[in-house]
Amino acid sequence: MQLCVVANRARQVGSRTVSFSAVAFVTDEFCSQALSKLSPYPGLELAREYLLRELPVLSHDQVAQANAGAGLNVIVCFEGWAYNGLSAEQVLAVRAKQSEALRLGLSGYRIKEFLAYPIGEDALQWMLNAGARIRRHYSNYFRNGTVLRPVASQRPYLVGLTKEEALAHPGSSLADLFIYTPPRFLFSRSQRVLLQHALRGETCETLAATLAVSRWTVKKRWNAIYERVADVDSELLPSPIADGLDASSRGTERRRHLLNYLRQHLEELRPYGASKRQMPHIEARNSANKIRCNGSMHERLQALGLASATLSLITNDLLCLPPLIAI
């Protein structure tokens, strides 16, 4: 499950969260049931199935296989906002940052269907403006009289978007969730975990403590990562220096270049379980990438730096906290 949070850094610790959304990858069966017969409150349904030990949320390995295969069903199962005391402009900023957090949280996954449960007409209109389609109004659910019909501001809806709809009507923010490029480097799970923590700014010392390994093991994993990258794209990183005064600084430079690249290519950090049938095609593609010229290193770094600076903009002290590690 992914947790996307927007925090106001100007507030005191403990009261900074202004909005959040919890996103889960679910089975095809649960997605089909949500579109046809489930109640309008998915969090309650997930809790019920969890108690029955029938949780329809995919495991890490199942996510990896689906990400390398037909794709994933995404459902926004919980969300909330703390709009009290915010102006209309600040609410708009929170909404924009929440959309950005969701995009970053799902970037790099092969999405085939997106579902969300907006509560109230304002939230519904926001999702429609973002490119979603109404799937259910739940009129029949409230018509039988056993459940009171909520007021307009609390009425639930089900909205969604499929990959086919996104491709047919590109340009919306939700349609961008379906943009996908397979990973090139196919890092191992331990390598991805190290890189995810490194993107948080952890040094070799803190990485060793976090991963409960020795500094020598951390260094060995970095070297294996660099070798894997060089095998696929020999021009992406500066060439290594075996020894001398510049060896340490060159290692830091290589790490910086790689992390800058990964910030724009999160598919490299996502679970990906390629089958044996897919591996020859992936290896052939990577061999072709090795000899393809993608412009000079200077040009690539300029593009990465510009994109990174754009994503780091803070509006009204609102900082987007993208989830880089799935729980």
Image: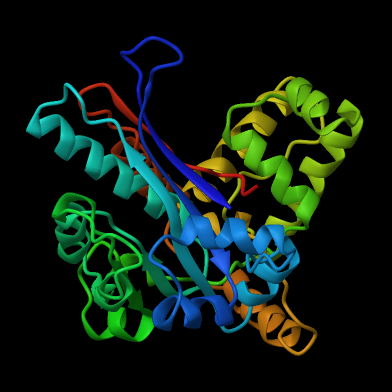
In the image, 68 versus 288, the foreground residue is 68
Q: Please determine whether, in this image, residue 118 is positioned above or below residue 69.
A: above
Residue 289, quarter of the rendered image: bottom right
Q: Position of residue 119 (x, y in %)?
A: 27, 54
Residue at point 28%, 59% (across, down): 148
298 to the left or right of 169: right
Q: Position of residue 191 (x, y in %)?
A: 76, 49
The residue most toward the bottom is 277
Residue at point 25%, 61% (across, down): 173
In the image, 79 versus 265, the foreground residue is 79
Residue 75 visible in the shown view: yes
264 to the left or right of 138: right
In the image, 75 versus 94, the foreground residue is 75
The color scheme shown is rainbow
Residue 265 visible in the shown view: no
157 to the left or right of 112: left
Residue at point 67%, 59% (across, down): 50
Q: Position of residue 131 (x, y in %)?
A: 21, 69
Q: Please determine whether, in this image, residue 7 is positioned above or below residue 254.
A: above
Q: Please determine whether, in this image, residue 279 is positioned above or below residue 305.
A: below
Residue at point 38%, 40% (across, down): 308
Q: Position of residue 273 (x, y in %)?
A: 72, 72
In the image, 274 versus 37, the foreground residue is 37
Q: Please determine whether, in this image, residue 269 is positioned above or below residue 169.
A: above
